[in-house]
Amino acid sequence: MARVRTGVRAVSAVLAAVLGATLAGCSSTGGKRAEERAAKAAQGRSAVDTPRWTFAMVTHSGDGDTFWDIVQSGAKQAAVKDNIKFLYAHDVEGNKQAQSVQAMIDQKVDGLIVSLAKPDAMKDVVAKAVKAGIPVITVNSGSDKSKEFGALTHIGQDEVIAGEAVGEQLNQRGKKKAVCVLHEQGNVGHEQRCEGVKKAFKGEVVNLYVEGTNMPNVQSSIEAKLQSDKDVDAVVTLGAPFAPTAVKAAQQAGSKAEVDTFDLNAKVADSLKDGSLGFAVDQDPYLQGYEAVDLLWLYRYNRDMLGGGRPVLTGPQIVTKDDAKVLAEYTKRGTR
């Protein structure tokens, strides 16, 4: 038995030596390089030595939309890491968004990221970019049109699936009648979200169209709906900035309807913690921006394409009061 133990100790010693040599080799080559790249990125320096390409992102965002601030935060951090010059433009009007895309094409950018909330307005100009040899990735809206328009891939959530997640959550909470608040006319993604809610929710869903650029109008419209229909026990907003307004509307209307929302920001996280909001469904806008830039870089550098061109899903994730406590730090720094 003594010889067996000695043999085991000897084998163990050999394995330890081999493992130690392997780890030393890793930390002196790949591991060390990875640490160096991480340190450079943390200091705001490029972690790669590829050419300084220019990537542009053009979205359907309105002014002051915190969701798109988070998307930009992710895109900019990836741009620093990948030695990319990052340009950004936005307009809520589809035709003006298309004009901004044309301007980026005229500048001969090396990669293009666009949202397709108004796909009819964007179809021709995206085709022009593809024809000009500019690789295109779509984000956030338009997953069903992305491949048709010639984009390499789409990064975001499937809006119908996200809506279904909301409907299922409402079922679990025992809700019977919900109002789905659409704040942007013609946005196909918003229509798909409410469609998904209706598909999965066992109760009744009523769509309410409001003027999203006018918060007093949003509040008064929701308030009037809740006053006129006492059966409504859930209000679903389609964007984080509209959630606090819906809460105020419910309070003014004397309604006990629970307010829930798509998307997450610092105010939503706080409202989840204090219980004024029921839940949020997060699609991780930071990841949408970061991955869009990173995938364009990978494509330019190595012709890589995550998912083989299929949509890359970043959500949905249901966030509740308990989750908000953990995510509060990230929402305040603008990455969730």
Image: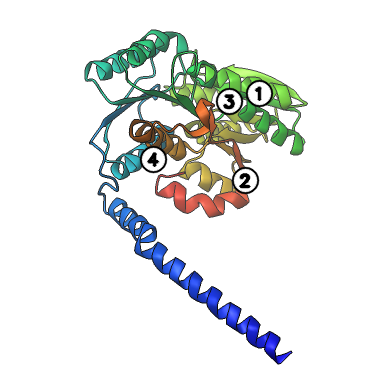
| Amino acid type of the residue tagged 2 in the rendering | Thr
Near mark 2 (Cα within 10 A), the count class, few <14, some 14-19 or many ≥20, is: some
Distance from label 2 to label 4 (Cα)?
Answer: 23 Å
Residue 156 visible in the snapshot? no
Q: Do the residues labelled 1 and 3 touch (CB within 8 Å)?
A: yes
Q: What element carries label 2?
A: loop
Q: Residue 47's spot in the image, x, y percent?
A: 29, 48
Q: Which of marks 2 and 1 is nearer the N terminus?
A: 1
Q: Which mark is residue 196?
A: 1
- Tell which circle, 4 or 1, labels the residue nearer the N-terminal end: 4
Give me the disc on residue 74.
4
Regarding mark 1 in the picture, which secondary structure is present there?
Answer: helix
Q: Around disc 1, counting alpha carbons within 10 Å, would you say few (fewer than 14), some (14 to 19), or many (20 or more)?
A: many
> In the rendered structure, which amino acid carries the disc numbered 4?
Gly
- 82 lies above or below 13: above
The kind of residue tagged 3 is Glu
| Mark toward the viewer: 3 or 2 | 3
* Label whose residue precedes the other's in the sequence (3 or 2): 3
